[in-house]
Image (cartoon, grey):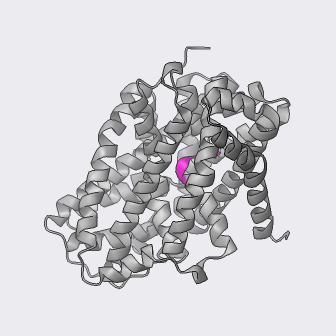
Amino acid sequence: MAERERFSSKLGFFLSAIGFAIGIGSLWRFPYLVGKYGGGVFLLFYVAVIFLLAIPLFILELSLGSASQRNPVGAYRILGKGKGWTLNGYMNVFAMQLLLGYTMPVAGWVTAYIFKTGAGTFRNMAPAEIGEYFGAFIGNTPEVIAWMAVTVVLVVLIITRGLNKGLERANAFCMPALFVLLLLLILRSVTLPGAGAGLAYYLKPDFANFTAQAFYDCIGQAFFAIGVAMAAGIVFGSYLRQEEKSLVRQGIHIGAALTLAGFLAGLVIFPAVFSFGLEPAGGPGLTFVTMPNVFNKMPYGTLFGVLFYVLFYLAALSSWLGGAEAVVAAYMEEFGMSRRKAVYLVGAVMFSIGCVAAWSMPFFEAADTLLNNLLILGGLLLSLFVGWSWGLPRFFAEANVLSPGLRTYITILVKYLAPATILLLGLRMHGVL
């Protein structure tokens, strides 16, 4: 087997990992779930789940990749005591391939909005007209497919260039710029007339709006955002240089950065939603209906709008690149494919699933629900594997966990608390309890 590529530095790993999470997980999916489940209460539980559950599980995945130097399937095969564990590796790869495919229409939306915003398409539209325009646009399937094909081609071209010149170099620019622009947009959004109601909705928890289904989806979103059970954590862990490993600290930093990004995205969106009298539970299109209204009210709004969608796109692109790299690694190592063939296969499947998702919103929503379930199941199996098969002593050694208190917490969480919480909640959601 060819020598594995390595991240050039800790910073390169950090930027690539948060780029994988921030693009789709935090800037698109998180805000519309906050709107769906009543604002501040979802935010509160989301932050708790990220730090108490998702980050520790992500660190487990980094350690599996670091210890095995393989993709998810190979990691479970090498480290597991039975071949049955490889099924979770295959499920991780399938989940990532599914995500790469069904989110391709979102790629088409973002790409189109870069050019439509630059052309001034939304400049003289009322808020309601912008919402109607978006509905008509996503219903124009051939146009969406044409726009999303651009991303498929870019993923295929960029991922063949390798880890350092492609993924790392793009994120070194995109991530800092994205945070700067988010801060600028927040300043404009929170000063809009009526923005206070949006801030209250977003920041003040209303527990009456939070249900067991909301908590279940909160766990799924946390896993989606940081990348639990989506193959990338294991592959990224295998790309770390031995001397640059600090898995616990790196996992916490990544979780904190993606949580901050999601939080900031909400501060941009929800004050503007209430300012313009729009519906906060606007679904997957929330970003594309609300943000043009913000830019219409902002000095140099066209410029800021183009920059926002460009940077949103580049952040999202880093998600697709990181995910595609994970799937390509699995195809190469498990099926003996050349890199070129593996990349072409990933691109073809991405495009095929994306076409179906663009054509059918029910399929899009069903794929999103299926992914949610796969991630939660994958997180359950991950905790069982490390807690009861591979063994926590091996994990502690690989991740260099020395603190007795942290060891105790991780032991309780991984062996008992995480499996019980995920299992009981999952059974309830599916009508078994």
Return the x and y of residue 226 as percentages of the image width and height: 54, 48
Return the x and y of residue 358 as percentages of the image width and height: 51, 60
Residue occupying the point 35% across, 85% down: 277
Of all residues, the one furthest to the front in this rendering is 404
Of all residues, the one furthest to the left in this rendering is 299
Residue occupying the point 53% across, 52% down: 225
95 displayed left or right of 5: right
Return the x and y of residue 177 as percentages of the image width and height: 27, 47
261 displayed left or right of 72: left
Q: How many marks?
A: 0
Q: Nearer the viewer, residue 224 or 150?
A: 224
Please give the range of residues in magenta: 225-229
Quadrant in the picture for residue 170:
top left
Main SS of the magenta segment? loop
Q: Nearer the viewer, residue 89 or 241?
A: 241
Quadrant in the picture for residue 289:
bottom left
Above or below residue 32? Residue 13 is above
Residue occupying the point 75% across, 65% down: 425
